[in-house]
C-alpha cells in the first residue's frame, strides 16, 4: 500500500520554509508520521497524531527542536503534548501539509472504510463527534472577527467581502474545516483553470456548504521503476 500527504503551494508554506526552515521540517515530520488508522498502537495515538520522541529522533539539535515546536504551536500550525516516552504532535490545519491517506477495500468501487476520513476531515464512524461538530459555530463572542479574517485571508477571490461576512455566521463547522477545504479546493482543476475564473464568491461558497464539494485534484504521479530481467 502506498500513502501520501499533499504539500500545498501557499504563501504560508513559502514564508515558513524561508524564515523558519526547522519549523517547516518539523511540520513535515508530523505530517509524515501522522497515524491514519484507529485501534491499538504502542504510543496510544489517536487518528492524525504523530509520535515525535525527542530532538534526536527528528534530526535536530535540542535548541532548534524547542524553537521549532514553540513557533508551530504559537502560530497554530500544530499542537504538542508531552508523554513519558516523548512528544506527541498533531497538525492543526492544512496551510502547508494535508495528511490524506486513501485505502481501497476489496471491492472494485473502492468505497472509503469506516476508519478513513471523509473529504471534510470528519470521521464517518463517530456519531457523537459528528453531532458535536454539527452544533459548532465559528462566530461566538469576540472570536468572530478574527475567525472571519483568517478565513477571508485564506480565500482566493477577494470580492464581496460584506456578503461573505454576512454568510459566515451561518456556518456550522469549525474554522479548521473551512480552511482545510479552501486549501484543497485551491489545488483543484476547477479553481485553477482560466486563472481562477470559476472560483465562486466566498458568500456563495459558504451559503452553498461548498466545503463539502468533491473537487478533482491533480496529484503528482509516482513513476514506477522499470522491471529488470533476471538471468
Image (cartoon, helix red, strand yellow):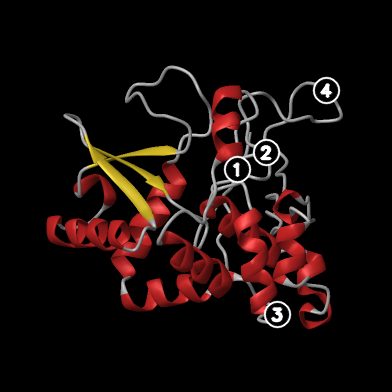
Residue ID for mark 1? 121
Residue ID for mark 2? 118
How crowded pointer 3 is (Cα within 10 Å; few <14, some 14-19, many 20+) is rated as few
- The residues tagged by marks 1 and 4 sit, at their Cα atoms, a distance apart of 23 Å
Q: Nearer the viewer, mark 4 or mark 2?
A: 2
* Image x and y of residue 80, in percent: 28, 45
The residue at the far right in this view is 108
Q: Is residue 118 above or below residue 126?
A: below
Residue ID for mark 4? 107
Judged from the image, the secondary structure of the residue bearing numbered disc 3 is loop
Q: Nearer the viewer, mark 3 or mark 4?
A: 3
Q: Quadrant of residue 166?
A: bottom right
- The residues tagged by marks 2 and 3 sit, at their Cα atoms, a distance apart of 30 Å
Q: Nearer the viewer, mark 2 or mark 3?
A: 3
In what quadrant of the picture does the N terminus appear?
A: top right
Q: Is residue 74 left or right of residue 194?
A: left
The answer to whether any part of residue 217 appears in the image is: no
Q: Is residue 163 above or below residue 128?
A: below
Q: Earlier in the sequence, mark 1 or mark 4?
A: 4
Q: Which mark is residue 160?
A: 3
Q: Earlier in the sequence, mark 3 or mark 4?
A: 4
Amino acid at each position: 500500500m502506498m500513502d501520501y500527504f499533499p504539500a500545498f503551494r501557499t504563501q504560508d508554506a513559502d514564508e515558513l520554509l524561508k524564515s523558519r526552515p526547522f519549523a517547516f521540517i518539523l511540520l513535515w515530520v508530523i505530517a509524515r508520521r501522522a497515524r491514519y488508522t484507529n485501534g491499538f498502537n504502542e504510543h496510544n495515538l489517536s487518528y492524525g497524531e504523530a509520535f515525535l520522541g525527542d530532538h534526536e529522533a527528528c534530526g535536530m539539535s535540542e535548541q532548534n527542536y524547542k524553537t521549532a515546536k514553540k513557533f508551530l504551536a504559537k502560530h497554530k500550525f500544530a499542537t504538542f503534548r508531552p508523554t513519558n516516552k516523548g512528544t506527541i504532535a498533531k497538525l492543526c490545519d492544512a496551510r502547508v501539509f494535508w495528511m490524506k491517506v486513501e485505502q481501497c477495500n476489496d471491492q472494485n468501487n473502492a468505497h472509503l472504510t469506516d476508519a478513513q476520513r471523509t473529504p471534510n476531515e470528519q470521521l464517518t464512524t463517530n456519531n457523537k463527534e459528528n453531532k458535536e461538530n454539527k452544533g459548532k459555530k465559528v462566530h461566538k463572542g469576540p472570536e468572530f472577527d478574527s475567525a472571519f479574517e483568517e478565513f477571508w485571508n485564506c480565500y482566493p477571490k477577494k470580492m464581496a467581502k460584506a456578503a461573505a461576512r454576512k454568510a459566515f455566521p451561518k456556518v456550522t463547522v469549525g474554522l479548521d474545516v473551512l480552511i482545510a477545504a479552501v486549501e484543497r479546493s485551491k489545488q483543484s482543476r476547477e479553481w485553477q483553470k482560466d486563472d481562477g475564473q470559476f472560483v465562486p464568491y466566498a458568500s456563495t461558497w459558504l451559503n452553498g456548504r461548498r466545503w463539502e464539494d468533491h473537487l478533482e485534484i491533480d496529484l503528482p504521479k509516482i513513476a514506477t521503476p522499470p522491471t529488470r530481467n533476471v538471468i
